[in-house]
Image (cartoon, helix red, strand yellow):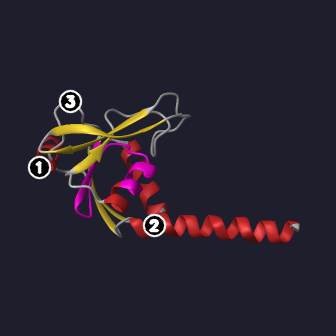
Amino acid sequence: MSRLTTSIFLSSALILGATSVHAALPDEATLYKNPQCGCCDGYARHLEELGVEVTIIDDVELGDIKQQAGVPYGLGSCHTIEMGEYWIEGHVPMEAVTKLFEEQPDVDGIGLAGMPIGTPGMPGPQDEPYNVYAYSDQQDEPFMTLAP
């Protein structure tokens, strides 16, 4: 295969891959956060780069939002996102978010506790597995584990 053909093939695959990720995601999301949290803004920018229009709300009691979303006690993070029919808690990697919208399980949402390094909005390399959980009515169950 010639260099030009290889380059065209790889470029096409990347474009189609990016399009399929976007196709699975809703066009809009609402991100609830603390006004001083910059990593949450980084997560919003990441979604926007994927074509999702993000509305940021930083003047609401996050505890109330997390309770409304059904986030299990002790598994919260710095922001909560309402996206389509689901809630996304924290810096959940896009691989898990895409899986959620492709499979559409009967859950309230998915989350990743804390603020793990290497996730969207949190700079640095991933140095441990990300244990993404699914939840409904403040009860959690494993959703997927993403290895470093």
Q: Is residue 75 left or right of residue 122?
A: left
Helix, strand or loop for disc 2: helix
Which range is magenta? 79-99
Q: Is residue 49 left or right of residue 88?
A: right
Residue 119 position, x and y percent, is: 46, 41
Q: Residue at x 44, y 56 (%)?
A: 45
- Residue 136 visible: yes
Q: Is residue 73 above or below residue 37?
A: above
Q: Earlier in the sequence, mark 2 or mark 3?
A: 2
For the N terminus, the quadrant is bottom right
Residue 27 position, x and y percent, is: 36, 70
Binning the other alpha carbons within 10 Å of mark 3 as few (below 14), some (14 to 19) or many (20 upward) gives few
Q: Amino acid at mark 2?
A: His
Give the Cα separation between the discs numbered 2 and 1: 27 Å
Binning the other alpha carbons within 10 Å of mark 2 as few (below 14), some (14 to 19) or many (20 upward) gives some
Q: Is residue 10 above or below residue 88?
A: below
Residue 90 position, x and y percent, is: 32, 43
The numbered mark at residue 22 is 2
Q: Is residue 57 left or right of residue 120?
A: left
Residue that label 1 marks? 68
Q: Earlier in the sequence, mark 1 or mark 3?
A: 1
Q: Residue at x 32, y 67 (%)?
A: 28
Tell us which disc is closer to us: 2 or 1: 2
Q: Amino acid at mark 1?
A: Gln
The numbered mark at residue 74 is 3
80 falls in the magenta region: yes
Give the Cα separation between the discs numbered 2 and 3: 31 Å
Give the Cα separation between the discs numbered 1 and 3: 15 Å
